[in-house]
Amino acid sequence: MNQDSEPTGEPAESAPHGDAPTEETADDRVVIGIRTREAARIYHFSAPRGQVFVGDYVVVDRARGDQLARVVTVPDDDAPEKAVPRDVRPIVRLADAADRDRASAQAAKADEILQAMRSSAVRDNLGLYPVAVELNLAGDRGSAWFQAPDHVNFRPMLEDIEGRYDVSLQMQQANQRERAMLVDGYDICGLRLCCSSWMTDFPHVGIRVAKDQDLSLNPDSISGVCGRLLCCLTFEHEVYREMRGTLPRVGKRVSTPAGMGKVIKLNVLQQKVTIALDDHPQRVDVPAEEIGLAVRPEDAPNQALIDAERDQLAADERAAALRRAAAPAIDPSAPEAADASDDSTATDATSDAPKRRRRRRSRKPKTDARQVDQPSDADSSERPDDDDAGAGQRKRSRRRRRRNKAQVVNQDRGDADGRPDQDAPQLQRREGDARTSRRRRRSRQPVNRPDPREGGGDSAD
């Protein structure tokens, strides 16, 4: 027979650990739920039936030794009897006053160890922050949580603390939310932190949760003491999603008793929609029950636009009737009447047809250096008469400007008595040749070389 039996409140009724429970054990024991810390995870143990109730304290055997725990769940009296699973361990005993005093003394010792660890971390500049320390009832083993941005070497500090207080600690790194849970505190609502008072698991909170509730995206207003998004944002998220499902989305066109418009804002709690009307610049709040189905402009256009189009068609019909009434009466049997009717029909068709915008031609001649100076006969035959007339007019304008310029030059170079100089055309021609040769010589000058005619020096020619 196995002698290593687990201790219980009644040793005579305890079953060996790992062996199948007997019928007597199944009838006399029940499965209870306990917590070693407030808002911690629930662990299940077996206890004698009818001796443990919710709120009682018991001593349980865990990985770090015996610990004081509080009972949170107990089966009802009328619940059907079930056999205790094999992997459920029994409680050690019901806690008494001595166990509670011992637990309080170990909590004070844990606080002293925590302060010593913080002082050692600051003194040695380890780059970590000890968060919490928990010890078992014996005070020889426990766990310590710390926060650090990266991997740190805490071995020297741990050896110093273990040697000074004669305790074996297991170091665990905690994140920001776990630190808030272990330290405890109050949030912006004025109540205790949910993770420290009743919440056992951390929910997944995203920025979409805040957007669905139309909350301000300011980090100071939607973040908790841990620096993360508030866990309570997820508590009402499903309700908001259900209430939002009956409302049209922002940007959709809807029909309302006030007219057609576009949704620009939603009030989920009051079930109201802010509409920007097409016929009025003022925005109105419409209850959700007064909003029709979302429609597209081409399926159900605005009533004001329909009325405007109807008025325009009526005005066009009246104008056409007045034109027909003002036209002279012509005998339909006469050939002239037939021609006139044909002309009127063509005129009406021309007036109804959209007018084409005439393209304006450029005044500058479109010449290309690569083209031959003398165009071929085929090109000249295909060129329209309007282009020939325009080219001739441009040539006459250039000749007129040259004649006017020559007259001005002759007047300036004439005799003192006002008669024109006979040598003026030759002088003008020579000056033009000199300017042409000067331009040609300048084009052959290097870029960074000064002009000899302006600054002096030898000429390149």
Image (cartoon, grey):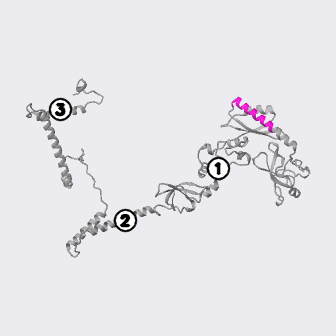
Relative to 372, is 27 on the left or the right? right
Q: Which residue is mark 1?
A: 233
Relative to 393, is 422 on the left or the right? left
283 vs 251, nearest the viewer: 283
Q: Is residue 120 magenta?
A: yes
Question: Callout 2: helix, strand or loop?
Answer: helix
Does residue 183 sit above or below 238 in this rendering? above
C-alpha span from label 1 to label 3: 91 Å
Q: Residues within 10 Å of mark 2 (few under 14, many from 20)?
A: few
Query: Which segment is the magenta one?
Result: 107-125
Q: Earlier in the sequence, mark 1 or mark 3?
A: 1
Contact (Cβ within 8 Å) of mark 2 with mark 3? no
For residue 434, the mark is 3
Residue type at mark 1 is Leu
Measuring 27% from the left and 27% from the top, which residue is drawn there? 450
Query: Which percent across, then down, holds residue 337?
Result: 22, 72
From the image, state whether disc 1 or disc 3 is nearer to you: 1
Q: Which residue is mark 2?
A: 313
Q: Earlier in the sequence, mark 2 or mark 3?
A: 2
Quadrant (top left, top right, bottom left, bottom right) of the C terminus: top left
Residue 190: quadrant of the picture:
top right
Whether residue 374 appears in this view of the structure is no
Q: Earlier in the sequence, mark 2 or mark 1?
A: 1
